[in-house]
Amino acid sequence: MALPDNQHDQRMLALVRPAQWAVAPRSDTYDLIAVGGGTGGLTAASGAGLLGARTALIEDDLLGGDCLVSGCVPSKALLHAASVAHEVRHAHHWGVNAKVEGVDFARVMEKLRSIRADIAHDDGAEVLAKRDVDVLFGRARFVGPDRLTVGDRELRFKRAVIATGARPRVPDIPGLAEHAITNEQVFDLRQLPQRLLVVGGGPIGCELGQAFARLGAEVTLVELGDRLIPVDDPDASALLLASLRADGVDVRLETKLAGVKRADRGYFATLTTDGGDEQLRFDQVLVAVGRIPNTHGLGLDAAGVDVREEGIIVDRWQRTSNRRIYAVGDVAQGPNFTHAAFAQGVTSVYAALLPFLARKPRSPMSWATFTDPEVAHVGLRPAELQALGEKIQTITLGTDHNDRARTDGDPPGFGRIHLRSGTDRIVAATFVGRNAGDLVAEVAALMTANKGLTTVLETVHPYPTRSWLTLYLANEHSLLRLTPSTKTWLKRWFRWGLR
């Protein structure tokens, strides 16, 4: 990936793609080779190296992958800058006389790049070398079930982990590929687009759409479906929609982008609904409609690795159809999250090198969309819960039940716990509000430990924190157990049993 010539990006490049890096393979045979230097590959290679295995990591672009360069890290820095602007604009609600005189977008992006360069150290080549990992820059290609090439060198492996990630999907819409940008280019912008079209109402589209709106852009977001973040709880989608519109985002649901063409200044986009076509002018068009696994050119046929459109086929241990080769992260079938790639990287190392210590992965998958409000979920998806019907008991409380949310003036949100009927066993949970991603982690930990919601009542939570919302949800569940017959028995006990 080409990066602008500035001090921060040059500092990052010196860490994740050192110009003078001339490490040669120390062996023709490795215990483990990781192909791809994103989160999954870094985790697998680091773990193997620290265990003492002969380890190599091959990367043909930048270490750190999408998360560091064009995903989690820069997007959250941009979101924070947007949040600061939003807080200042609304400071008068708290009796604070402040205003936003303007947003210096160039300085916002410079700060973003500075943060990215600071974090890049953790993913750098020198750090991997200290973990006894051979970092090899170049394109890897499998030429057999236990062999691959990098450059003009052929290497053998006892085990390999494919972690080549994914790239943005750009639909086959006239003019889109020629004129649109994706998350891979958006953080290279130096000027704030006055008018921005965001295509896609998933997490990336919603996060970036809200951020650019809060920084001062006129944002139009188009989504082909009938709601935003469609894999999440419908009530969460509705709250997010209201928040985006309150921030000035022109959200167009059930709207199709029919084409993009260049104008004298910017681009014309044709939007289609049941009511007809509309042509609008924009300065930038940002596409955020999903990702495509990076499997092309890897030589997977020669390696005997089965792959489908949605990624490499893996089992619960991340093992492919070739018992020597594992696949983790966005290139494999499954959830496309950085934390999923990290967990899968850990699983693959133990399964590949220490199978007698490997344990069945049992942690439920969680995810978060870092908009305002945040939307976080863990466990079964809403559609799966609906299919179970009466087998599921659901408890919901609004964030107006949480004192910290009230003192901080949080926007409307909620916590929702789904239990197996008649038990306290959690099968899923959704949180909408500030720090929702942190709140869902406590529930995920309970589910991993096979503990029920009652455990929350046995845990002292610091007050006042938003975590008390989970405590109140647990208390609501306990109150449901106070049936009329239970209360009758208790009254008899209080009258005759107490002495």
Image (cartoon, rainbow, N blue to C red):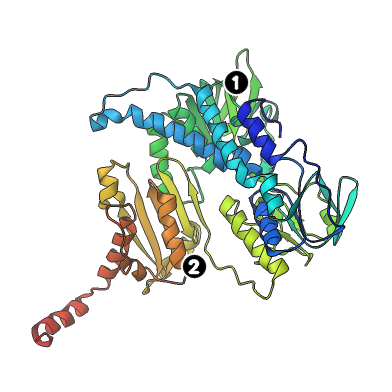
Residue 273's place in the image compared with 30, above or below, is above
Q: Quadrant of the N terminus?
A: top right
Between 263 and 45, the one lying in front of the other is: 45
Residue drawn at point x = 17 percent, y = 82 percent: 489
Q: Quadrant of residue 408?
A: top left
Farthest residue in the front direction? 130
Q: Tell me the kind of residue under disc 1.
A: Phe
Residue 115 found in image quarter: top right
Q: Could you say where residue 271 lies in the image, as x and y percent from the top left? A: 56, 28
Can residue 239 be seen? Answer: yes
| Circle 2: element type | helix
**Residue 62 in the figure: left or right of residue 8:** right
Q: Which residue is mark 1?
A: 268
Q: With respect to residue 365, does 230 lie above or below? A: above
Query: Which numbered disc flags the more N-terminal residue, 1 or 2?
Result: 1
Position in image of residue 127 (x %, y %): 66, 48
Instruction: Look at mark 2 in the image and give the residue it sits on.
Output: 448
Q: Using a 10 Å C-alpha cutoff, classify the residue at mark 1 as few (fewer than 14 neighbours), some (14 to 19) or many (20 or more).
A: many
Query: Where is the C terminus found, in terms of image quarters?
Result: bottom left
Which element type, helix, strand or loop, lies under badge 1?
A: strand
**Residue 453: numbered disc:** none
Q: Quadrant of residue 455?
A: bottom left
Q: Nearer the viewer, residue 219 or 146?
A: 146
